[in-house]
Image (spheres, rainbow, N blue to C red):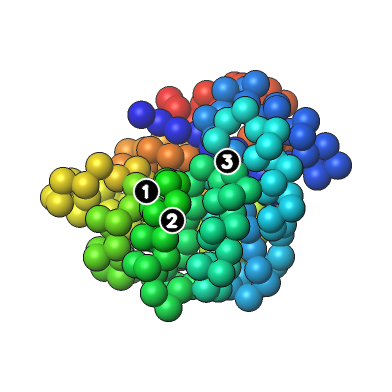
Amino acid sequence: MIIVSASLLAADFNNLGYDCSRAADAGCDWLHFDIMDGMFVPSISFGGPVLQSVAKAARIPVDVHMMVVEPSRYIPRYAELGAAGITIHAEASKDPAADLRLIRSLGLRVGVALKPATPVSEIEELMPLCDMVLVMTVEPGFGGQPFMPETLVKIRQVREFADKQGLPLDIQVDGGINGETALLVREAGANVLVSGSYLFEAENMTAAQMSLRK
Ligand code: DX5
Ligand code: ZN
């Protein structure tokens, strides 16, 4: 099943609630919530208080992508505030397995993310602890960057590994996803498509989100 997740980093923050509704009305499946700490990535986005407001009003699940050093410091709080799932970066944690187990113990969907330069071999042991692997298709930190085609091989590697091990993993992609790149990542094995600027800048968000599925 294809899941389309609208990345709120590209929303209009003067009208955040309206843009959350717009994504749900357009037929997006999830909201993608990027938390950046200015350490793991250069920029700072938004954190707990904004998550609380969004999760309270959202009509579709809010999936949190943590670009944060030592994410365990915040995982319980974000669970309490209404995250449906939390994805941490393998590179950001001293003990990613423990963090993934913590997310699981709180009853949330569990995800592990990889930067473009991090090889898939680094997360092979973590995959059995996860519902989802996020293969970043741009360098994390900013919206609106062009898709990196060299990440396609990693999507295939994750899909092959998961199939071989019999793991029912979702594969998420994030960065530069539009009507054209969606086809490439889906062919490689991705099924959860995060998209920010393409969806929020579209004249017709319904048509735009549908174009990611075909
Ligand atoms: C980048 C974020 C993405 C970003 C994607 O670090 O994780 O979720 O919002 O934006 P687009 O779809 O514009 O590349
Ligand atoms: Zn993201």
Q: CA distance from mark 2 to mark 3?
A: 15 Å
Q: Which residue is mark 3?
A: 62
**Disc with the residue nearer the chain's start (2 vs 3):** 3
Element carrying mark 2: helix
The answer, for residue 17, to whether it is visible in the render is yes
Rendered position, 115 above or below 58: below
**Disc with the residue nearer the chain's start (3 vs 1):** 3
Rendered position, 61 above or below 130: above
Q: Nearer the viewer, residue 194 or 154?
A: 194
Point out the image quarter for the N terminus: top left
Q: Nearer the viewer, mark 2 or mark 1?
A: 2
Residue 212's spot in the image, x, y percent? 49, 31
Rendered position, 138 above or below 83: below
Q: Which mark is residue 103?
A: 2
Kindly identify the amino acid type of the residue bearing the numbered disc 3: Val
Kindly identify the amino acid type of the residue bearing the numbered disc 2: Ile
Residue 137's spot in the image, x, y percent? 47, 55
Element carrying mark 1: strand
Give the side of residue 72 with respect to residue 95, left or right: right
The answer, for residue 10, to whether it is visible in the render is no
